[in-house]
Each structure stands twice: as structure tokens, then as C-alpha cells.
Amino acid sequence: MKKFLAVVLAGVMVFSLAACSGGDAQTGGTPTTADGEEGSKTKNTLNYGLSADPAGLDPQTTSDGIASQVMAQVFDNLVSRDEDGNYHAELAEDWVVSEDGTELTFTLRQGVKFHNGETMTADDVVFSINRAIESSITKTITSNIQSVEKIDDNTVKVTLPFPYGAALECISNHYLVIISQKAYEEDPEGFNTNPVGTGPYRFVSWERGSKVTLERFEEYWGDPASIQNVVFKVYTDSSTAVLAFEAGELDFMYNVPQVDRAKFLDTETVNYVEAPMNGNAFILFNNRDGVFSDVRVRQAVTYAVDRDAIVIGALEGVGIPVSVIVSPVATGYPEDLQGNPRDLEKAKALLAEAGYPNGFSVEMKIAQGDMYKKPSEIIQSQLAEIGIDVQISLMEKSTWSQEVITNRNYDMSFEVATYALNDGDAIYNFYHSDKIDNGLNHVLCAIPELDELLDAGKRTTDQEARNEIYRQVCQIILDQAVVCPVYTSYASAMAPNTLKGLDRASSVNEYNVKDFSWSE
Amino acid sequence: MIRYILKRLLMMIPVLIGVSFVIFTILNFTPGDPARMVLGDTASYEDVEALREEWGLNDPFLVRYANYVGDAVRGDLGKSYRTNVSVVEEIVSRLPYTFTLALGATLIMVLLGVPIGILSAVKQYSFLDTFCTAVALLLASIPLFWLGLMITLAFSIKLKWFPATGADTLKHFVLPWIALGAGSMANVIRMTRSSMLEVIRSDYIRTARAKGAPEKKVVFKHALRNAILPIITVIGLNFGALLGGALISEQVFAIPGLGTLLINSVRMKDAPLVMGVVLFIALAASVVNLLVDLSYAAFDPRIKSQYAKG
């Protein structure tokens, strides 16, 4: 009796503790500050959440999406691109494209200061762009730039091997920011942990694994930022980040976990924004070897897939079903192209034609994570309806990378791809037959008409013409079912209502803190 | 005695070599290419190859292992593939956090766990005893992750007594200490209780009581001193494990310690960092074991003389 009583008492104690604190959290924690924490209380600091420690802070040697959040505040480009696809002058006041489209001449802004006090010169611009051209990490973006040279102290010329349609897009990419040549040459190894740029914030310190601190650069060439300090805090666990947000220790968080979306959308004091990402999720097929080398088999899959069901089941409805491989937010997205409607009879007929009247069994290799697992399981059940028995093989991301992307040892897989370039040309590396052996064409497709179109799209500068070309590209990929696009998911971000300037989520997950301000 | 210590220190060397070989082999044969992880999925095949050449990843396995050991004995554990920072520097920068976490949790374990265990043993079968045993069982069963989040919700969000995450001040460590200490405390309570119970039944305790010694002296000077060996073993083992990285606590409370470093480097196939951290943990565990063994000598003269004999 005594023993029983003790256990019950202990249980009651623990559960009551959990219940009352759990209840409060459910109704939406108002971001307030625990005492002892500096920062948002004094409203001159923005605590910005990161999901991992940056790998480095050198823009031309770091491919890390986390690091680019920090670097976006420290560096500027010659030209910047906004969410609507328009280009704005930054470090270049003006630019001129030559008649044949192979030369871009930039007139540089004068009197721009680096964080170390030096003035930006054409030499810094040439140095930085050359680094981006040579670095193996940034080459995917800069492979279409031939050279850059200084014309005079105010002018820099970029030369392209052909009239490259996405040239300005490249220039505005975060790999092509301008760094201080002097600062780099003084300490090449140290630049990675002590970056010097022209941006609205200067680097102060980096506590590895914990936080990166920046402060406002008073001699910024543009309007000085409103918030004085930015502290990037690392939270490897997303529930911890959400707790920190509720406790007021974190002011800004992007890629909010799906489970918390509903809660924060409903919370009055939280500003939650979302926008489609620049990328999509799709089923990939090995087009060259194995059962999917037959176009009819691939098409059968596209007739059997129910995209709406997958968006509801895997994303809880927070996504856009897409049938084309270019993201809805990229320039050149063909809005009118429709994929195949779900037609199980047609799918089965195609399979029978291809020689599989009773279906077949196939392995689907995917990387670990709900992002891949949930949609794959739904696809598995949808394909079972036409007799395709999908065996899902889960593996670690790095293993998946090696098997699917490097060794091309797979039949079918599921991938979520985001593109570095906000342009149709982003897919060139993935679908052109030249890129099978020394590129990223891991679906192993080799379609001559497709190759021609992709080449043309790269070399045309007239945007109307390019839109038409990419429309045809999408049509071919659709007809040949090279891959089966499924959906585009949403990027999200949130902050307390008192933070002004967060009007929309960024499709590429890059935010400019200089546009934010505290309203008190 | 000194000879004993030296002998033990020398024995650590084969242990470390064995550990390093096993880990190196495992890292070598698991799939996943560190060069590709660093350069990203979009890098070209040649660039990945070039980086692999630069890091010597294409050399034969034994050559690479020999190079690693050769550098390691001179104190050079290499540089992290991902961040290019020296492995030693990375580990040293995380050490204070892991140490603080481990030390605080161990103090809670000792200062709360041992007295509760003693109390339980002395007042066996009383209500207090059953209550404490139940609590110990509960603490041992509660998942650390859940406990961590719950106490954060209670003490940080609701009561605002402590900060929720981060590792800036000692105040930040209070909640992690409680979470970690609670879990390991259970072990200590039970071990203390059972060890004390065994000793309390002995003849010499009966004799001491018969001679009229005050109960406090009986318990602390006679019983505890004899019961302490297994208790110290458990405490030592727990401390060693905590040094190895209280990974879950670190994740829940966003503390940049060794555990987080280890798991991130495993994910990225960052071999030098994985090797460095694992070797450090092996070394720390060996040192803790040695200290525990030496403490036996401090408490039990019979063992001390055994050591002295070499």
C-alpha cells in the first residue's frame, strides 16, 4: 500500500508539472525575455537563428547555405536581384551590355568603404570575381564567365564566351560578392574566420558552434542599417530553436518546422511569412539503365501519381503541386503547362505495352529524413495501384549522394532540389547530355532536341525568347517523363510583430537584416 | 605506488592505438565521400577528385593510417575537412562547455544521490525508502530529451527563472545540470543504497553499535567508508560518460560541446575531427578510470598496499 502510494504521488508530481507548462505552450507562447538575457530587451540587437554552425565565412570557398545567411549581411554584389526578378545597382552604379551580348561593362560606385577602412577599387572587384571563377566550389555558377578585367579605376568589364542569358543572375549570386583584396592577402587562412566586405554589417566575432556577432558598419555606402547588432545563434535542434523563440532569446527564425506552423500562424504577436521555394521535389528515374530506360514505364508513373494527395499527406497541404521541373518562382516558369491527369487505366496500358502487364518490383533509394520519406511512402502506395511494387531503401544523406549522384547506381529515387541560380539555365547542368560524364546529369538523359534547346536558352539574351525556349524544355521533359516533378514546398520565416520589414519569406532563404527595424 | 601509476599510463597507449585503428577502419569503409560533402552536390566530378587527391584520400588504407598515427604522436591531429580549423583547436574550444556540464551534473549526482541513497539504506522499508526508490526508478526511466524540454518549459518559459538555451553564463547551465544530473542520479542512488545495505548487515557494524558508537559515526565512518568503492565506480563511470559528450542535453539546450561536435562531424564524414574527438574521449575515459582506481587506494588501505607492491 505504501509503495503504491509513493509511486502514484511521484507520478502525479511529474505529470502535473508537465501538464501545466505544456498547456501554456499550446496556447502560443508570447515571446518574452527571460531575465539575464541581453539583446531584444534593449532593442538594438537582432538574434537570428541558424540551424548549424557555418562551415566558414569566405564567400568564394563556402558552399554552405547557413554561412550565406551571415555573409549576406557582410558583403555586397555589383548588382542585386530582388524577389520579383528585377536588378538593382549596388556596388556598380550602372552597367552596359555590348551589342553582341558577350561583354558587360560595369561603372563602379565611388567612395565605397570596406570594413577595414580601405576604399573599394576596381582591383578588388577583379580579384573577387576571379576568385569565384577559379574556385572549384563556385564554378557551377561561374562556368559561363570567361574573364574579368579592369578597364580603369571606375570600370570593370566581364567577358562571356557567348551571349549568356543568365549573366546578370550570376553577377548577383552570393558567390560573386566583392571582398577586400588587401584583407585577404594579409591573412588568407584567417579570412575564413574574419571576413572583410562592404556590407551594412561588419564582422565582430565568431564563437565556434555557438554564435557569430556582427555590428552595424557606420560608413556603409548606402543607408545605414537600423538595428545595431546582429547575433547569429546556432540551434542544431529545431524544437530548441522554437523554445528559444518563445522565450524571447531568438528574434528571427527561418525554415520553421512544419509542426509549429499552425501555432505561429495563429499567434497574434508573431509575424509568420511564407513563399514558394526556388526548387522542387521530384521523382527521378535512371533514364539509361534498368527498367526506367523505357519511356513508357516512366510515363506510366506520371499517370499514376496523385500530386494533390502527396502535398496533403506529406506537407499537410503547405505546398504547390507542380508538373514542370522549373520552380514557380524562377524566371521563365511556364504557367500554362499541365502535367498528365491521374489515369490508372492509361498507366496500366502503358506498362503492358512496355512488357510489364503484371507490373514489376523496383528499389527506390532515398535519403533519410521526413522530407524524403513521407512523400516516398505515399508514392509507394500510389504506384502499388498499377502493380509497381516499390521497395524503399533508406540511407544516410552522404551515402545517398554517393550512390545516386556520383555513381548513378539506382533505378528510382526522390530528390528535393533547390537551384543556386534563379533562372531556367539552372537546369542545364542536370539535363544536358554533355553533363553526364563531367557534370551532374545523374538522371542520365540524352535527348538531342533537349540539348539544343538548353544550349539555345543559355546563349540567348532576349527574355521573351528565353521564356519560350524554357517552355519547350519543360514540355520535352514532361513528354519524355525524364523525371516526375511533384511539388514545390514553402520557405518560411517568423519574427515578433515588433520587428518591421519582414514582409515576405525569401525563396532562396536569404534575408537582409538592413531592411529590418524594431518598432519601439 | 608511482610504479603502479606509470604502469597504468603506459597501458593507455595500446588502448588508444586500438581505438584509433578501429575508428579509422570504420570511417574508411563506410560509404560517403567527405570531399563531396564539403564541395556540395553541385560540384563537378573533377573538382571532387582534385580535393580527394589533395587530402590524400586515394592513398592505400594502411599508408593513410600510418600517416595519421605519425602525425598524431607529434600532437598534430590534422585539420577538419569542413572548416579547415585544426582539430586540436576545435576540441579545446568545446572543452570548457562539456567540462562544465559534466562537472555540474556529477556534483548533483554526488551531493544529492549519495545522501538519498544512504538515507534509503539506513531507513530501509520505511516510507522514505520506498519513496526514494520510486523516484530513482522514475528518473532512470524518463527519457532525457523529454525531461530537458519539460523543465525548460516549466522553469524557463513559464517561470522565467533561467534562460532556455545557450551557454553564456553559469545560469545557462542550471537547467542542463538538473536534466543530466537527474538521469544519472538514479544509478547512484540505487548503487549507494544496495552497497550500504550489504555493509550494514556485517558483523563489524553490529560490533560498533554494541560498543555504543553514535549512529552517525557508525553510518559515516564505518559503513560508508566500506561501502564507498562500488559507489565511486559508478560515479566515475558516469562522469567519464558525461565527458564523452552529453549529446542529448547539448542538443536540447543548444550548448556547443563535444557531443554535438562529434555527431556533426560523423554526419559530414569529417574523418580527422571524428578521430580526434573519439581519441579524446577514449583518453578521458582512461584517465577517469585511473583516477577512480587510485581513489580506491585512498579509501582502502588494503588496496593501497596491493598497488604499492606493483
Image (cartoon, coloured by chain):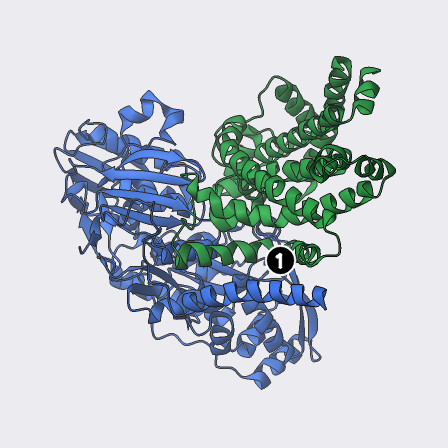
Chain colours: A blue, B green
Q: Position of residue B175 (x, y in %)?
A: 49, 48
Judging depth in this view, the residue of B199 and A419 nearest the camera is B199
Q: What residue is rendered at 77% in x and 42% in y? A: B195
Quadrant of residue B294 within the rendered picture:
top right
Subunit that carries the residue with mark 1 = B
Judging depth in this view, the residue of B121 and B22 nearest the camera is B121
Does residue A60 appear to the left or right of B34 in the view shown? left
Q: Residue furthest right?
A: B203
Q: How many numbered tags mark residues here? A: 1
**Three-letter code for the amino acid on which mark 1 is drawn:** Ile
Q: What residue is rendered at 66% in x and 64% in y? A: A7
Judging depth in this view, the residue of A431 and A81 nearest the camera is A81
Q: Is residue A449 visible?
A: yes
Q: Where is residue B258 in the image (x, y as percent from the top left)?
A: 55, 37
Q: Which residue lies furthest to the bottom in this view?
A: A345
Element assignment for label 1 = loop
Q: Residues within 10 Å of mark 1 (few under 14, many from 20)?
A: few
Q: Can residue B81 be seen in this view?
A: no
Q: Position of residue A143 (x, y in %)?
A: 38, 42
Quadrant of residue A258 within the rendered picture:
bottom left
Residue bearing mark 1: B142
Does residue A59 appear to the left or right of A120 in the view shown? right
Q: Which residue lies furthest to the top in this view?
A: B3
Q: In the displayed structure, would residue A345 be above or below residue B28?
A: below
Quadrant of residue A175 within the rendered picture:
top left
Does residue A214 appear to the left or right of A58 in the view shown? left
Q: Where is residue A412 in the image (x, y as percent from the top left)?
A: 60, 63
The C terminus of chain A - image quarter: bottom left
